[in-house]
Image (cartoon, grey):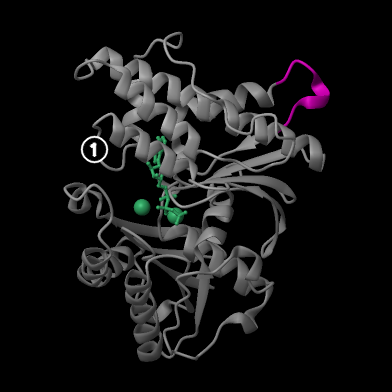
Amino acid sequence: MIVLGIESSCDETGLALYDTDRGLLAHALHSQIAMHREYGGVVPELASRDHVRRALPLLKETLTKANIDKREIDAIAFTEGPGLAGALLVGSSVACGLAFALDKPVIGIHHLEGHLLSPLLATRPPEFPFVALLVSGGHTQLMRVDGVGRYELLGETLDDAAGEAFDKSAKLLGLDYPGGPAISKLALEGNPEIHQFPRPMLHSKDLNFSFSGLKTAVLTAVKKYPSQLEYADKANVARGFVDAIVDVLVAKCQTAMKQTGLKRLVIAGGVGANQQLRAALNAAANHNNPKKRFEVFYPELEFCTDNGAMIAFAGAMRLKINPRLATRNYSFNVRPRWPLDQIEPA
Ligand code: ATP
Ligand code: MG
Ligand code: FE
């Protein structure tokens, strides 16, 4: 079964073809980051219009790379939510229009399910069950994953998402949007002894997070400098920030492993591309005490942030379990707000 996946929930247009026999056949992506940069964030109307421009050329590119004809597609999966309404509508109308023309079924996919399952696309995929840390631009959640569609929320952020904390702190340092990768790179040159930022909720015993105080601490530190920050000052603040957020994320993962008794941890979402986080998690997983050891799995770097491959894959996994999830109702529904616990079981 060949599934076409279409992702358009925010500022990336992603298309991909996944074959349940042969794996990922091809994928293509356009990121709008450069377009939104001058506004310091995603402008929803510009995002929707750009998805309209990109979707069909990317579809052609994906079909060409996979060397198949569009009539060989068996079903079309699209991101139904959550995300920007106008952006989602583009993906869903392209999916439904194409499906109608080809007389194929469609399936709406939850964007976070796409992120959660993306590590299964890697060459060394984890087996179920596992704990998943979902750290993206809009979400920070710890989840117990028992199978496709079987997700239990263990804890989540009470305010900012981890990616948001990276981006906002980067902005305070005058770095371009999205600042996550930039502030991490800068942190590599910083001195860890200069700024000790708070580790919010580190000892709260539950699996919730809070990052807005950390952002405020960064703001306060920046304001204390009498004049414009030198490059080295910025690097020191960046280092303090990255050390603090990584500490919290790693500690909460360790608590989640202990509480669930599971031995596999999966990292998903854009912040999962962060090298400092990966290094710290790998060290924690390789604990001196064998009882505290666990395995960590990451998606391929290109599948950490938004992409079509994870949507095609989630669609294929759902349809493999239950072919009746595919529908010929082409009413291009979208669900801009859609809590993951309201997802239909597969
Ligand atoms: P959501 O999936 O919650 O709707 P999103 O799709 O915008 O949000 P992703 O595409 O998964 O989120 O991730 C984007 C976020 O990841 C941004 O906040 C970005 O700064 C952050 N990010 C990407 N690479 C890195 C990195 N190397 N270090 C830290 N943060 C990063
Ligand atoms: Mg994005
Ligand atoms: Fe995302």
Quarter the C terminus occupies: bottom right
Q: Position of residue 32 (x, y in %)?
A: 24, 55
Indicate left or right for 64 with 204 as reference: left
Task: Determine the secondary structure under disc 1.
Answer: loop
Q: Quadrant of ligand 1?
A: top left
Residue plotted at (58% across, 48% down): 158
Q: Residue at x 66, y 24 (%)?
A: 284
Q: Is residue 279 left or right of residue 274?
A: right
**Which residue is tagged 1?**
176
Q: Is residue 303 found left or right of 131 in the rendered image?
A: left
Looking at the rendering, the stretch of residues picked out in magenta corresponds to: 287-295
Q: State the count of labels.
A: 1
Work out whether residue 280 can be spotted.
yes
Magenta stretch containing residue 63, yes or no? no
Quarter of the picture holding the N terminus: bottom right
Instruction: Using a 10 Å C-alpha cutoff, classify the residue at mark 1 as few (fewer than 14 neighbours), some (14 to 19) or many (20 or more).
Output: many
Q: Is residue 119 above or below residue 16?
A: above
Residue 89: image x %, image y %? 35, 77
Residue 94 horizontal side relative to residue 154, left or right:
left
As rendered, which of 61 and 36 lies closer to the eye? 36
Horizontal and vertical percent position of residue 214: 47, 32
* Magenta-span inclusion, residue 291: yes
Q: Residue at x 42, y 78 (%)?
A: 72
Q: Amino acid at mark 1?
A: Asp
Q: Is residue 300 above or below residue 49?
A: above
Residue 126 visible in this rendered orientation of the protein: no
